[in-house]
Image: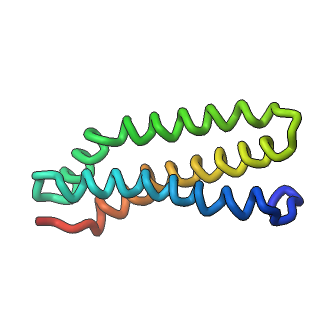
Amino acid sequence: VVFGWTLGPIEAVSVPLVVGLSVDYALHISHSYIHSHAKLRGTRTRTAIAEIGTSVAAAALTTMLAMFVLYFCTIEIFVKLGIIVGVTIFVGICMSLLVLTSALYKIGPEY
């Protein structure tokens, strides 16, 4: 397991919850893309990023900053939780803002 940790109750509970939070970022961007009034993929993608991208990025950043503080705790459970949540949120926002938007730009639906 990553960092030499065993899979305990904290990891078993926190990982599914944080993955759900990360999916939320992609859902917001996809929702904004689908509800865009533009016709072309590129314009729809740019509109989605302009409308919701900043808010999604700010939400991820504040969550990661809050988890960064937990890294300095003396209680191991909080340190693990902070690392798990922070890394997962970072990967989730990168996938949403980079991979998802690139996919929408290239192969997203056009109306």
Image label count? 0
Q: Name which residue lies at 65% across and 60% down.
A: 15
Residue 19 placement, left or right of 84:
left
Residue 29 place in picture, x, y as percent:
33, 52
Q: Is residue 75 above or below residue 48?
A: above
Which part of the image, by quadrant, shows the N terminus?
Answer: bottom right
Residue 28 place in picture, x, y as percent:
34, 51
Residue 28 placement, left or right of 110:
right
Q: Is residue 104 above or below residue 48?
A: below
Please, which colouring scheme is shown? rainbow
Residue 36 place in picture, x, y as percent:
16, 52
Q: Name which residue lies at 16% across and 66% down.
A: 110
* Residue 73, picture quadrant: top right
* Residue 111, picture quadrant: bottom left
Q: Name which residue lies at 82% across and 63% down.
A: 8
The one nearer the camera, 49 or 17, is 17
The one nearer the camera, 96 or 79, is 79
